[in-house]
């Protein structure tokens, strides 16, 4: 299988499978945005691998006309890691949800971040378990009544961006399911980054958690409730970008546009990113989307293959027989 052209259109990434999500689900918009983005990345279609775990979002590989794996619950990062190490030339993407990634898959996710393989993770966060009928998830807000928390959830939720920053992910970003131009831009930026990239996508579940992000993403409020973190640009928001944010040693303040802080995602301690992502969603300060961190460091699969090459050069190719007979051996009579 080979590509004769890289002049792809969105339709080139649409599979022959019927898309089966609930009508109105935010997954449709994400699928559309990712297919559009993939068409413009300049990567041969047979180089893409889409890996998922379990959940509504994890049907994604069926709907992408690429190679893919539908794996088991929470293990998508492990399978994706194996794919990338075995063939570093592949463009490997993980599609996961807040439950799949942050509950049963939490350990796999943070270690994939730590190891810094060149894989990209898109986490669809609807703050609920959708596939299994609406139980609370690791990102569900406290007090929410669900089949598994009939009197209201008591758990303190994970903040996916804070988890990624804390685990050392080199690229950390957030976007919104229905804001397709922004989503495409973030997917393109994640692809361009060499190393592990983590993208949280705020996504609506119309059946079990409808309107979970209306206070951030609804068209009539989003200009005033979102600030886009654009590296090298001031922190501005509002319909006409007439408001700014100033980050001081002690606080984050609303200010005039000319006083807004320039956003830097490529160095330092990342303290500003942590502070911004953990601000209350319903306060005066808008919710940050965009790129929180963008720092490159050595990529694991390259180091692994360099180590293998060096060992082979120094010790020779070796055989299975020599491997089995190496080290301490003994006979049993």
Image: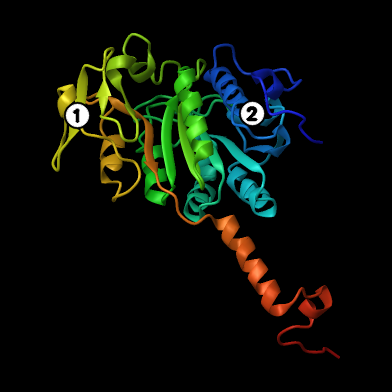
Is 332 above or below relative to 215?
below
Quarter holding the C terminus is bottom right
Q: Residue 162's image quarter? A: top left
From this viewpoint, is residue 139 visible? no
**Answer yes or no: do the residues labelled 1 and 2 have beta carbons within 8 Å?**
no
Q: Position of residue 245 (x, y in %)?
A: 20, 28
Q: Residue at left 15%, top 22%?
A: 256
Left or right relative to 104: residue 169: left
Q: Is residue 164 above or below residue 50?
A: below
Q: Which residue position is annotated with label 2?
A: 60
Report, in whole angstroms, how far the alpha carbon at label 1 lies from the one at label 2.
39 Å
Q: Earlier in the sequence, mark 1 or mark 2?
A: 2
Task: Point out residue 61 in the picture as x, y percentages from the top left corner.
Answer: 67, 31
Q: Residues within 10 Å of mark 1 (few under 14, many from 20)?
A: some
Q: Residue at x 48, y 49 (%)?
A: 113
Q: Nearer the viewer, mark 1 or mark 2?
A: 1
Mark 2 Cα within 10 Å, few/some/many (few <14, many 20+)? many
295 or 272, which is in the foreground? 295
Q: Looking at this view, is 38 or 139 the one in front?
A: 38
Residue 97: mark in rendering: none
Residue of label 1: 260
Task: Point out residue 97 in the picture as x, y percentages from the top left corner.
Answer: 53, 33
Residue at (29, 31) in percent of width and height: 233
Tell me: 151 left or right of 258. right
Q: Is residue 160 above or below residue 147?
A: below
- Image coords of residue 42 (percent x, y): 62, 32
Label 1 element class: loop
Describe the element under mark 2 as helix, strand or loop.
helix
Q: Which image quarter holds the N terminus?
A: top right
Residue at far right of view: 333
Residue at image coords 34%, 41%: 265
């Amino acid at each position: 299988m080979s590509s004769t052209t890289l002049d792809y259109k969105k339709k080139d990434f649409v599979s022959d499978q019927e898309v089966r999500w609930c009508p109105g689900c935010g997954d449709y918009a994400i699928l559309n945005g990712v297919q559009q983005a993939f068409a413009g990345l300049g990567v041969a279609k047979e180089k893409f691998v889409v890996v998922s775990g379990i959940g509504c979002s994890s049907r994604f590989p069926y709907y992408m006309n690429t190679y893919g794996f539908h794996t088991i619950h929470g293990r998508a990062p492990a399978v994706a890691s194996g794919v990338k190490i075995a063939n570093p030339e592949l463009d490997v993407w993980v599609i996961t949800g807040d439950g799949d990634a942050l509950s049963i898959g939490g350990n796999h996710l943070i270690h994939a971040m730590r190891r810094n393989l060149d894989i990209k993770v898109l986490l669809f966060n609807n703050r609920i378990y959708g596939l299994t009928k609406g139980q609370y998830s690791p990102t569900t807000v406290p007090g929410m009544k669900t089949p598994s928390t009939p009197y209201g959830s008591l758990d303190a939720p994970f903040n996916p961006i804070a988890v990624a920053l804390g685990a050392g992910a080199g690229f950390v970003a957030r976007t919104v399911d229905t804001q397709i131009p922004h989503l495409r831009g973030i997917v393109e930026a994640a692809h361009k980054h060499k190393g592990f990239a983590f993208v949280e996508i705020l996504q609506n579940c119309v059946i079990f958690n409808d309107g979970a992000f209306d206070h951030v993403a609804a068209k009539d409020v989003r200009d005033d409730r979102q600030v886009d973190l654009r590296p090298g640009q001031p922190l501005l928001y509002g319909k006409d970008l007439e408001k700014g944010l100033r980050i001081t040693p002690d606080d984050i303040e609303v200010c005039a546009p000319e006083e807004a802080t320039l956003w830097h995602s490529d160095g330092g301690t990342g303290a500003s990113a942590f502070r911004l992502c953990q601000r209350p969603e319903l306060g005066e300060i808008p919710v940050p989307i965009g790129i929180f961190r963008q720092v490159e460091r050595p990529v694991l699969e390259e180091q692994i293959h360099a180590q293998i090459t060096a060992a082979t050069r120094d010790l020779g190719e070796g055989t299975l027989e020599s491997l089995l007979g190496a080290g301490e051996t003994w006979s049993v009579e």
